[in-house]
Amino acid sequence: MISRTELHTVLDNLLKPEDIKDYCPNGLQVEGKERIKTVVTGVTASQRLINAAIEQNADAIVVHHGYFWKGENEVITGMKKRRLQTLLAHDISLFAYHLPIDVHPEYGNNAQLAHLLGIENAKPMPGVSPRGIVYQGEFSAALSPQQLAQRFESVLGKTPLVEQVGSGSVKTIAWCSGGGQGFIDQAAEAGMDAFFSGEVSEKTIHSAREQNIHYFACGHHATERCGVKALGDYLHSQLGLNVRFIDIDNPA
Ligand SMILES: [Zn+2]
């Protein structure tokens, strides 16, 4: 068992939120009880995740997508009221780290995706800010776009949307988890054979076609489970906390 402040310090020391400009506050977003023994991790602090955390008797929740996003309506009504009311009524702390969980060199979504997918020499793409938001790497043996699509499906549990351009195989690849589709242009400029992200936009397909780069949309949720899950493993091994990752399925 540790204190809420100690957990906050451990998370901040690891993820260094002060180094990155983000669209939400990173760290403790909602303050709960003083002592923490059981932690639930998840992709998004949705009502379903909170309810599941209550069932687990969690003292804290750690997520990638928390609350208080720049530009959102600031009043506490409706869905937002219900979520906050549930957390406060059960005295559960909410810790959220957005971009720091995407870019972290070990526990980040992008770094973890490289491990899971067998991508070698994975490293942040030079010149893209913040560092680590786009990664690049390569496969030891070139894959056909179909073989790569199968790998995404078996590793991430979701059939990707594929825009195959021509018959070339995939040796070099760049990626950005979640809503990172806009980075396809930097990947094309860097001469990558393929690019993948979580979400897709209409214009992403034209970028792929006109810059001759295979593109795969693998799901926002599906590409962002791995970071916070790895972070939970770290909290368990380093601090001896009970940690449980709860996957609230999301087809997007
Ligand atoms: Zn995301």
Image (cartoon, rainbow, N blue to C red):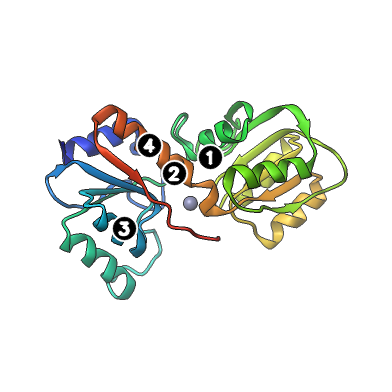
- Determine which residue is flagged by label 3: 52
Q: Circle 4 sits in a helix, a strand or a loop, which is it?
A: helix
Q: Mark 4 points at which residue?
A: 231
Kind of residue indicated by mark 2? Leu
Ligand 1 under 8 Å from disc 3 Cβ: no
Name which of mark 2 and mark 1 comes first in the sequence: 2
The CB of the residue at mark 2 lies under 8 Å from ligand 1: no
Q: Where is residue 139 in the image (x, y as percent from the top left)?
A: 70, 29
Quadrant containing the N terminus is top left
Q: How far apart are marks 3 and 4 (CA)?
A: 19 Å
- The quadrant holding residue 138 is top right
Residue 76 in the image: above or below residue 98 = below
User: Percent x, y for residue 92?
Assistant: 20, 54
Cβ–Cβ under 8 Å for marks 2 and 1: yes
- What is the x, y in percent for residue 83? 28, 65
Q: What element carries label 1?
A: loop
Residue at image x 66%, y 53%? 159
Earlier along the polypeptide chain: callout 1 or callout 3?
A: 3
Observer-side mark, 1 or 3, equals 3
Instruction: Name the amino acid, label 4.
Output: Leu
Which of pointers 4 and 2 lies earlier in the amino acid sequence? 2
Contact between marks 2 and 3 (CB within 8 A): the answer is: no
Residue that numbered label 1 is attached to: 133
Q: What residue type is labelled 1?
A: Ile
Q: Earlier in the sequence, mark 3 or mark 4?
A: 3
Q: Would residue 137 appear left or right of 224 to someone viewing this image?
A: right
Residue located 60% across and 30% down the image: 126
Determine the image quadrant of residue 79: bottom left
User: What residue sits 42% from the left and 36% below the top?
Assistant: 230
Rounded to the nearest angstrom, the CA distance separating label 2 from label 1 is 8 Å
Task: Identify residue for label 2.
Answer: 99
Marks 3, 4: nearer the viewer? 3
